[in-house]
Amino acid sequence: MNIRIFPLILLLSILFATSKQQGRRPPPVSAQSQSTQQNAGNRRGGQPSATPSLSRGGPQSPPSSIDDEDEELDSDGNKNFVCPKADGLFSDPNSCRKFMLCGSWRPWSQTCPPSLYFDGKLKFCTFKTPQLICGDVSEEETKREEQERNQDKLPTCDPNQCQLPNCFCSEEGTSIPGNLAPNETPQFVLINFSGALNELVFEHYKKVMGYSSKFSSNQNRHNPNGCGIRATFFLNHEYTNYAQIQWLAAQGHEIAMHSITHRLPEVWWTDTANYSDWAEEMIGIREIILANSGGSSSNSAITREKLIGMRAPYFKPGGDAMFEMASDFGLLYDSSVVAPRGTPPYWPFTWDYRQPFDCSNNKKETEEKKAVDGEDILGSRSQSRGRQKRSTKEEMSKNRKKLSIGEYKKSFEKIQKTPKQRVRRNSPFLGRPLKCATKPYPGLWEIPINPLWNEYNTCHHADQCVFPHATDDDDIEDIVNFLKDNFERHYGTNRAPFQLNFHVTWFTQKGHIKALNRFMDYLLTLKDVWFVTYQQLVEWMREPKRLSELNYKCENATATTCTRPHTCVVKHYLASDGYTAASEDNFSKSDTRYMPVCHSSICPQQFQWFGNHAGKKHNYKTIMQLVDDAVSTDNTN
């Protein structure tokens, strides 16, 4: 051997031996733990997230008070932790990088993704900011939040008193309106899109609904009566094209409210927004839609009477402040509350009585605090938490437990024959509980979100779902099967409405688009499946009719459409808080916005925004100020 090479080989050998001695062996992670951490990263589902909580200026600098913690997870670190509640997410007392996942009183230690830390109040992983709470929140604040969510004053369902058309409830939440049998009940599909509507998504949405060409109003996807399928659009204001909104409304699709700002942080909607804020966001966007989409026309497709539905941003209901606002302003329905996953799924209900599932995510205080061997909150057997080998795609496809529609029906019939017991499913939010109503709001409908789920996911918007094996645009079988499995959970049991909730993200991936089209084609082969709007669903629930009695008629497209859209160029003035409108005489920052509307005559003086929905330069008023003026006028008269 060359003598000059020998020292180099010796040095490399020493370095290798040293690194082997000093290297840290990562802890064993079971397949279930990987799935759990993956679900815990889904912030939109209210669970810990790998997505940072961003302000408009991006991530803030970390505070110096929190030390960096890079220790690996100790496989025995959960032995001394006692779950304060049966199910949920809790801070690790020894590390801000970690949190404890409790299921059926059993703790499992989890670690946030790199560079993220667990916030004890928000219950998800985020960047270190001055607002980050490392550790559990104070007992006083916990009690205050629990009191805000206390539903003891909200009565449970009384079917003898709650009668259609203005009230509907059932003890388990799974009963079909009108006591119809499943095979007599239409299977409604609610396809809906949340967010801004503009050129980035408009053509994608049209293709999903079966519009064959850019300028055509003819559809090639039809309901059993031969009419085109219908969808619902939950809109927020920023970057929206109001000419396109008007066109969709003229074709018979529903337009609903989703807020003006869609602001961050997400917890603003639950922790900060009051009655006036919710009115400004939801009624404000209603007035903006009316003003910019030709609502003043005598033959308009959009009128105030048609804008009667809402959805809270991020599926973050605001409790009584939100529901009272919706009730006072005469809205027909809300669709912000996420129901627990399960079979059979939930039907919509009215807020005359308490919802049929637990929003607080808490077990009863009388429940014995002991671990039970059975299904935990994650829907898996506790004994299966050991180390597992990840299956290959072929093995998973072979072993995938899939129930046929017939098997779902047999299971549902067995459930119906067993004696009824009051079993309240827990909220799917492992972190903070939902902020539901604590008092009745008669006649206000709630269309709950039945989540999509499988062994990898519990997702509320379809674009939040994870498909580990769908890496190729042409490899769509996993996605199609996932959608079919979730649909059959509805179709094969109580036929509760099946929702397909989308953001623009779904349509940025060709494989997802192909899978959705194939799934839609499958649904259209079923002659008892109807694609309807949320308003059409509520109309049917108020007066349920059997499949044989349905007599939907095709809507005549008599409403006017935008023949010559116009783009308004307006200034956007903001106050120092970054979210409230300001005037051109007193603003913190400004920019220029380009906003397509139906006609040049309806351009606002400045960009419409929170606090100035009319877009006036001076003397503008909030929604509640206008309400106070109207009340004062009535009292004077």
Image (tube, rainbow, N blue to C red):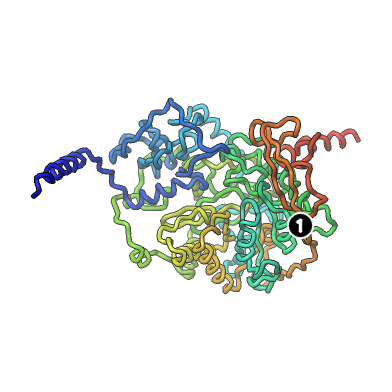
Q: Residue at x 28, y 43 (%)?
A: 26
**Residue 219 sits in which quadrant?**
bottom right
Label 1 Cα neighbours within 10 Å, binned few <14 / some 14-19 / many ≥20:
some
Viewer-closest of 622 and 151? 622
Residue 266 on image: x %, y %: 56, 40
Asked if residue 150 can be seen in this view, the reply is: no
Q: Secondary structure at mark 1?
A: loop
Q: Residue at x 80, y 65 (%)?
A: 558
Viewer-closest of 523 and 503? 503
Q: How many numbered circles does the render carry?
A: 1
Residue 233 on image: x %, y %: 66, 55
Q: Given the image, on which type of amino acid does mark 1 rest? A: Pro
Can you say whether 305 is above or below 517 in the image?
Answer: above
Give the residue at mark 1: 565
Q: Residue furthest right?
A: 637
**Residue 280 sits in which quadrant?**
top right
Q: Residue at x 78, y 35 (%)?
A: 625
**Residue 613 sits in which quadrant?**
top right
Residue 515 on image: x %, y %: 51, 66
Q: Residue at x 67, y 34 (%)?
A: 589
**Is 442 situated left or right of 59 in this image?**
right
**Is 212 situated left or right of 631 in this image?**
left
Residue 633 on image: x %, y %: 87, 35
Viewer-closest of 323 and 61? 61
